[in-house]
Amino acid sequence: MRTNSESTDPSVRRRERAIWGSITVLLIAVLLILAVTPSVFAQRYDDAERAVDVFETVLRFIEENYVDEVDVDTLLEGALEGMFESLDDRNSAYLDTSEYRGLNDDITGEFGGVGMYISKEDTEEEDESAGYVEVVAPIEDTPAFRAGIRAGDLIISVRDATEDEFTSTDGLSLDEVVDRLRGRPGTEVTIQVRRGSRAQFPVTLERSIIETPTVKYEMIPGDIAFLRISQFTSRTPEKVEEAVEFFEANGFVSMIIDLRSNPGGVLSAVVDVADY
């Protein structure tokens, strides 16, 4: 039981005021932290959220008001490409599905396909090869090579095993033809081939693993080892090691390493070859 004198003691009142003052300051500090912290974190995302809002607004506006019907995916692809281009960094770029697949093929050094180099050049309309894809050369020991495909053959049309009709290569880009020829190993693709001025026939090819040529080697007179590295893929180091073992078995005394027209490739492969 408290007495009246205890409740009116000045020292007690000062102590109580000090306690309540401390509690009040602490509460104010907590409230400030709670009030300020979300704004600090939010500020980090404000710019990104604003940009997303602007992008969505413009995308909706074009979709609803443009004079012709637009493909949203095409708009998105263009926006993503522009976003990376604005970085002004030649080592940063947006890759679509086809481009990424091509990059991955370069890195791994192998892909599922039929094994031939093809090209498509602008020609005069009266040229019989106008618009079609020409075989530059089949890659040795591949489905195309074994089927007798020759350099100079024209691929008139192509049909995947899952399709009912042939698609003319006249209306396809080179990349689109490449995409149709490549696929899962073990699956089939049929091409209509024109050879010469009259001969035209279908060829069905079963896709297999195609290894991108990267290393060639041979012994030349004078016990000289000749090593040609056309590009660097993830398989280049092991191929170089095979070449050197071949050179050692044949008693080489010197070596020529040919890197002419080599576009580069996988950095780790370059380092491994240099170390070796």
Image (cartoon, helix red, strand yellow):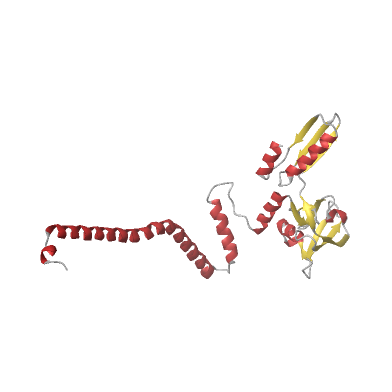
In the rendered image, is residue 196 in sight?
no
The residue that appears at 16% across and 57% down in the rendered structure is 14
All told, the count of numbered labels is 0
The residue that appears at 55% across and 52% down in the rendered structure is 84
Q: Nearer the viewer, residue 34 or 193?
A: 34
Q: Nearer the viewer, residue 173 or 20?
A: 20
The residue that appears at 57% across and 59% down in the rendered structure is 78
In the rendered image, is residue 46 in sight?
yes
The picture places residue 51, in percent across and down from the top left corner, at 46, 59
Q: Is residue 193 left or right of residue 56?
A: right
The picture places residue 2, in percent across and down from the top left corner, at 15, 67
Identify whether 230 is placed above or below 80: above
- Quarter of the figure with residue 12: bottom left
Q: Residue furthest front?
A: 1
Q: Nearer the viewer, residue 233 or 252?
A: 252
The residue that appears at 84% across and 35% down in the rendered structure is 249
Q: Nearer the viewer, residue 20 or 90?
A: 20
- Quarter of the figure with residue 178: bottom right
The quadrant of the rendering that contains the C terminus is top right
The quadrant of the rendering that contains the N terminus is bottom left
The picture places residue 266, in percent across and down from the top left corner, at 67, 45
The picture places residue 55, in percent across and down from the top left corner, at 49, 62
